[in-house]
Image (cartoon, rainbow, N blue to C red):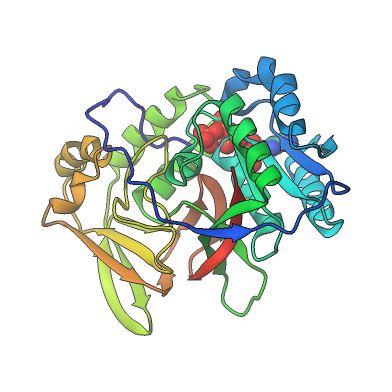
Amino acid sequence: MRWARRHYAVAVATPDAHAAAIRPLAVTLDQSVAVLANPSAGRGRHAGTFDEVLQRLRAAGHAVRVLDTPSRDAALAAAREAVHDGVAALVAVGGDGTMHLALQAVAGTSTPLGVVPAGTGNDFATEVGVPTDPLAAAAAIARGLAAGQGRAFDLARMTAPGSTDPTWFGAVLGAGFDAVVNERANRMRWPRGPRRYDVAIMAELARLRARTYSVTLDGVASEEPAILVAVGNTASYGGGLRVCPDADPTDGLLDVVIGRPMSRWTVTRLKPRLYAGTHVNDPLVVQHRAREVVLAAEGITTYADGERALPLPVSITAVPGALTLVG
Ligand SMILES: Nc1ncnc2c1ncn2[C@@H]1O[C@H](COP(=O)(O)OP(=O)(O)OP(=O)(O)O)[C@@H](O)[C@H]1O
């Protein structure tokens, strides 16, 4: 997902390494490692190294099984089945969307997730300190499995009212202008590629309007007129936009960043500052932190980890240590 292109390449803050707790892995060599791969992630630019990724993963001595994933639904079903079968780890090879799929299978289980960043954005991988090079990431997963050591991270668990069926996310939930842009871009047939997001941004900027959100933070409700509402377990989305710059996936809390009603000109002025996360210093941007966040507004479909998710209203809870990451 992209709601901004990267032509605003300003000095980018590198995330501080979050102090994740070490979690021992109960894996044995008779368990295989399941690989969930999205060959089209990153516009296929890492497809040529896939065999080498598998080779690096095998270094821990486990059999490596590539899941049959002809479609997104098939990928999710295969990942869930692999976790149910008791694999040593589920390894997601792709971008944030593939990682998001894998999270639905491993969240809240003892099965560790390995992330091999091969997408265009890889925001979650970056935030949890996974090596940016796919081969280095695969080697780190093998080392983690051999050492029997993972790292514990929080995840966000989102539900619709009256439902117990969770959607998990690891990075950021967009529920404002960003989500509206994604909806428009997804409806468009032309242009293709990142240009689609530029056109969608321009179209949505032209009709920019604040909505009234009902925001309930740990039981305390308020009405918030806003153009941007983002809920972060980690800081960034969209390929380095640090929308929730202080979010820490090890603090058991979610960061909520709200952009007050502002002009098109102010949005345009603030957008490049998202790369360094300094937009939160503007008086029109406020930050909160909470364990549970309930959001409601008319006409918004949320995007979680860049993927189309639930329509508002939703309830989101930080679940400490819901993810064991290996590598
Ligand atoms: N096996 C699969 N078959 C079909 N679609 C898949 C499969 N695996 C993942 N996807 C979907 O493909 C889309 C793009 O994947 P992904 O996000 O991993 O790559 P990307 O867009 O290049 O990376 P990023 O999101 O980091 O920019 C996502 O919506 C994801 O759910």
**Rendered residue at 42%/48% (across/down):** 180
Q: 173 or 170, which is in the foreground?
A: 170
Q: 277 or 250, which is in the foreground?
A: 250
Q: Is residue 227 above or below residue 124?
A: below
> In terms of image quadrants, where is residue 163?
bottom right
Q: Is residue 249 above or below residue 36?
A: below
The number of callouts visible is 0
Q: Is residue 101 above or below residue 131?
A: below
Q: Residue furthest top?
A: 48
**Rendered residue at 67%/53% (across/down):** 112
Residue 261 placement, left or right of 120: left
Question: Where does residue 318 sit, x and y in percent of width and height?
Answer: 48, 69
Q: 121 or 85, which is in the foreground?
A: 85
Question: Where does residue 197 sit, x and y in percent of width and height?
Answer: 42, 31
**Rendered residue at 43%/69% (across/down):** 252
Q: Residue furthest bottom?
A: 219
Task: Look at the image and tell me whether residue 68 can be seen.
Answer: no
Quarter placement of the C terminus: top right
Question: Where does residue 174 sit, x and y in percent of width and height?
Answer: 42, 53
Residue 254 placement, left or right of 306: left
Q: Residue furthest front?
A: 147
Q: 144 or 259, which is in the foreground?
A: 144
**Rendered residue at 61%/25% (across/down):** 135
Q: Ligand 1 sits in which quadrant?
A: top right
Question: Where does residue 47 sit, x and y in percent of width and height?
Answer: 67, 19
Task: Look at the image and tell me whether residue 38 can be seen.
Answer: yes
Q: Is residue 39 above or below residue 244?
A: above
> In terms of image quadrants, where is residue 283?
bottom left
Residue 27 placement, left or right of 200: right
